Image: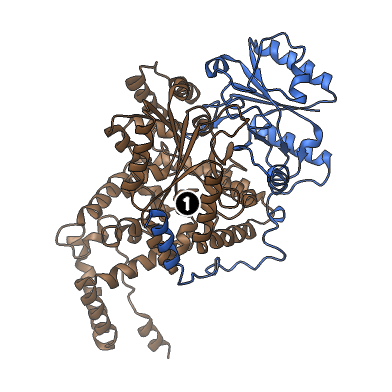
Amino acid sequence: MITFVKEFKKQATRLTGDLRHRSLIQTALKKYEVIRGAKQAKFQDWQVARQAAAETKWEAINHLDKYLLEFSQKLEARGTHVHWATTPEQARNIILKIVRDKKARSIIKSKAMTAEEIHLNGALEQAGFEVVESDLGEYIVQLRHEAPYHIVFPAMHLSRGEISDLFQRELGSAPTDNPEELTMIARRALRNKYITADVGITGTNFAIAETGMVSITENEGNARLTAALPKTMISLLGIEKVLPRLEDLALFLPMLATAGAGQAITGYNTMYGGPRQPGECDGPEEFHVVLLDNKRTFLLADAEQRDALHCIRCGACLNVCPIYRNVGGHTYGTTYQGPIGSVITPHLRGLQDWKHLSNASSLCGACTETCPVKINLHHHLLQNRRNAVSQQPVWWEKLAFKGFAFLVNRPWLYDLGKKLGRIGQVFHPIVKGTVFDPARNWTRTRELPELAPQSFHELWKERK
Amino acid sequence: MSERDAILGRIKEALKISAPVPGEHDHHAPAAGDLRDFSKWLPRVGSDFVEQVELFRANSVELKTDFRLLDSAADVIRDLEELRVGNGWQGLISHSGKLTDAALAKIELPVLITDGGYDVNAMEKCDAGVTECDFLVAQTGTVVITNRSAGGRALSVLPPHHVVIARREQLIPDLPTAFALLKKKYAENYPSMISLVTGPSRTGDIERILVLGAHGPKKLTVLCY
């Protein structure tokens, strides 16, 4: 479908020229670069840690059937209900059934990109349930009826002034440009929601096969409250989240925090192995875990790009990506933005519709270098390009390359072309930038380099 | 066929073709030694108690945790009294335990106990939650708690101030040690919640500016003796 490409180009053009947006993103990400660099330098050997993490995820993903089964059986043994969903619709229906059975009136939710992926909030609201996002950034974008701008920092594109306006409008609070006061407004607004909610929904960062636990990473404490107070808890996760052993977290928790936010470790990392057990004083009476496939098994079948399932959603590749930094998160039009989003979205939503994301790359490799689990990101972008073309060849591209081959195989013709080009560029300024300019797509935003007065070939001849 | 079997079936089918080994595409020299010995790659930790406690202290300063290394149980009682006055506490909530019982025995405040259940609205009104913990991790300034060691899931996160009482021997060097010890302590029957608490609740969601007390405690105090 052409509309996804058109929309992408339209938004990208608009945002690259939006100086306010650029300065907001550049400031935030420069700060990230500095603190991340400092935290990464504290590792005795970051490169070996990356290799260890990559090998651990490789082991998990390449034995996914074994570890998923172990994970689900361990959870069930302690009274957790484990559900399996092939499609987003199945996952939504499973969750809808649980909240209907519980006759829930209100639902509190902590951050979950998988829930964005299946458009869970929309489905719950349509069915008449109130869902409140409790992560501050997610709460802000929910109030704006927007998708998260970034998988880790959902409201990175907003200034405090815009957030203050939003809170005045939606919550009737007094205007302030103090981030602390703004945070306290949200804290007060959400406090009671935790206590009155019947159901809590969370995402999951890691699924520990060995012990049957979901591990949730957060800074605010909202996920811990979501998992402590409501009578029913639901955790949603993609099937790729598995880690084999509990002690793997000793490596993954600090690496996720360092790569994702420049923290040594995130504020709260909490593992849940079941509902309230005998002798425990609180916690949900029921715990449901929903495992989502949503085409991850298709990606798994592509051995060349299977390592894209190693992703721990730290967002580091977004942060360092020159494309993301210029076009921003919403431009992608996907749940997962940046390089990892460009790699996996064609697998999740169709290659032909989303191949343009793999073309929107400078192939600089910053993403591959920064990835804590060593996903071969920029090569996967190239592979997507190759696959898209071999699946659906473009006639004019084929023709252009045939013409190019014809030209370069005939030195006399190539020489003639150069000579004509040198004459042509004398007259180029007359049409430059106008509709008559044959190089218009280039010269609209850039200078066309001049042809050298003599080619290498000619210089070489003269030297003799 | 159930969805479970369908998904597992597709996985088995997909895995018939093997994937390239990890890290093949980059050219860092292979590591000497066992890759799984994470302690060797993670940030360095001193070898003795003095160095480790200094590291925990330095991390606490950065995290804005109020960490106090004390000499005796009497010091804990004195510091709690100071905190009560300084913060104007009206009511506390805690759980029964050797350290918490001793520390709160003489405090002149109503103290709710979470053992066996509690009223969440009453907990919400408390000024601070006082708990024990499993370990203190020097490497990251982390307090490791479980719902078994720290009076449930909510006590350490709902009240605006979390006070941890710990003994010096609970200080351990690093994260790999923490998980090894958790396994040793609980492998027979894990608590339903294990949490690694590192500093008070925080957010950077507004212009990446750090704010403490987003939803959880605004203050975290660790009294260690």
| Residue A133 sits in quarter | top left
Q: Nearer the viewer, residue A328 or A76?
A: A76
Circle 1 residues within 10 Å: few <14, some 14–19, many ≥20:
many
Q: Say whether residue A272 is left or right of residue A406.
A: right
Q: Residue at x 81, y 41 (%)?
A: B51
Q: Nearer the viewer, residue A382 or B100?
A: B100
Point out residue B153 in the picture as x, y percentages from the top left corner: 59, 30
- Please, is residue A143 above or below residue A147 in the view? above
Asked whether residue A288 is in view, the answer is yes
Write down which chain is painted blue.
B
Q: Quadrant of the N terminus of chain A?
A: bottom left
Q: Residue at x 68, y 45 (%)?
A: B188
Point out residue A340 in the picture as x, y percentages from the top left corner: 42, 55
Going by the numbered disc 1, the residue's amino acid type is Val
Q: Which residue is mark 1?
A: A320
Q: Nearer the viewer, residue A55 or A177?
A: A55
Q: Quadrant of the C terminus of chain A?
A: bottom left
Q: Say whether residue A459 is left or right of residue B129.
A: left
Residue farthest toward the bottom in the current orientation of the protein: A464
Write down which chain is painted brown.
A
Q: Secondary structure at mark 1?
A: helix
Q: Say whether residue A237 is left or right of residue B216.
A: left
- Please, is residue B204 above or below residue A36 in the view? above
Point out residue B171 in the picture as x, y percentages from the top left corner: 77, 37
Asked whether residue B210 is in view, the answer is no
Point out residue B34 in the picture as x, y percentages from the top left corner: 70, 63
Chain under numbered label 1: A
| Residue B173 sits in quarter | top right
Q: Residue at x 38, y 67 (%)?
A: A382
- Please, is residue B20 above or below residue A12 in the view? below
